[in-house]
Image: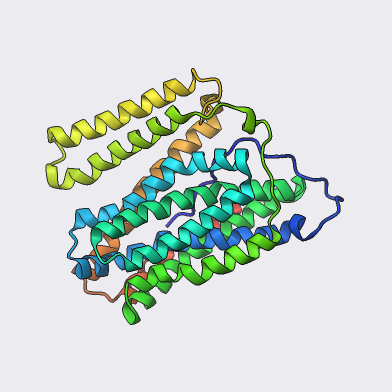
Amino acid sequence: MPSPSLPVSAPPTPSPPADAPRGVRNNPWLTLVAVAFGLFMVGLDGSVVSIANPEIGRDLNAGTADLQWVTNSYLLALAAALILGGKLGDRFGRRTLYLIGVAGFTVASVAIGLAGSIEGVIAFRAVQGLFGALLMPNTLALLRAVFPPRKFGMAVGIWAMVSSVSTALGPIVGGLLVQHVNWESVFYLNAPIGVLALVFSALVLPQSRNTAAAREKFDILGVVLLAVGLLAVVFGVVKGETWGWTSAGTLGAIAAGVLLLLVFGWYETRVAHPLLPMRLFRNPALAIGTVITALNFFVLLGVIFFVMLYLQNVRGFTPVEAGVRTLPLSLASVVASPLGAK
């Protein structure tokens, strides 16, 4: 599984000079440890669920399309609100949004385990993704606010490595929990991590914000167009299996989603304070990298979903055996992520 791509956020507050006095709330290494807790939760949860899906399906009598929504509702909410989470952090304080994200992610995780129905699991997975979108972009923004420029690259490398390690641990940790406890324990695991993250982060994280963002008009229409466009595309892809890939419903949903995303792109070039400044994509490196990253996640997240179902439901492997067989995919990202950041 790949590690999360670097979230987009408005220009952060300038880093303090290297010789600036440091307190507990301005110590860059304590800040890095604090954001690592939240990052670890999100990374671990992204990979352990793929191991738990077969057992969730058996326990809750869920079909493949339902299990797709267990994964996609989380990813959809995360993707749709990721830029919004960065913008809110710029406006109201990154420490505040990060703590809200950690708290909400923890509570939603416990709620998934208590849901008792596939509909409840899907709904709370979406809530979990929403709060994940609040904490993820603010992890980097918090690091940028406390690390001097010459050390920021190293901090990003460690950030990426934490994400990769948590993703790599997911198949093994998830396999052990599903096999020896139950699938609900995969989500309950976030409770102690989340409580520890909240306590530690509240003590050491500094507050930072973009003062210019507080004066800007909020791009509400941009948020709606992005969220609805993504939802329509994902809905069409998920329903393609049951409706047929050439059916009017499937093609119509995908086409409507693509059209809305195009309208979003056009609208963002016309509004004074856009949610996503489209001028960024005039940079060929950024534009090409974005497309490649999107294709990478589309392929790898899709593959891991079906590979886990195949290994456990068709080949008959236990959750631990299935997790071990997917480790090379995760371990490759452990090596590549810090090198890429460097």
Query: Residue 224's quadrant in the figure?
Result: top left
* Front residue (pair 4, 37): 37
Indicate the position of residue 120 as horizontal and vertical percent values.
28, 59
x 43%, y 25%: residue: 265
x 69%, y 34%: residue: 211
Indicate the position of residue 83 as horizontal and vertical percent values.
50, 39
Marks counted in the figure total 0
Q: Does 120 sit left or right of 152 as displayed?
A: left
Q: Does 186 sit left or right of 281 as displayed?
A: left
* Front residue (pair 285, 67): 67
x 31%, y 26%: residue: 259
Up/down of 268 relative to 160, above or below: above
| Residue farthest bottom in this picture | 180
Indicate the position of residue 325 as horizontal and vertical percent values.
36, 69
* Front residue (pair 202, 158): 202
Residue 331 visible? The answer is no
Query: Residue 335's quadrant in the figure?
Result: bottom right
Indicate the position of residue 269 as horizontal and vertical percent values.
49, 20
Residue 103 visible? The answer is yes
- Looking at the figure, which quarter contains the N terminus? bottom left
x 43%, y 65%: residue: 328
Give the image's coloring scheme. Answer: rainbow
| Residue farthest top in this picture | 270
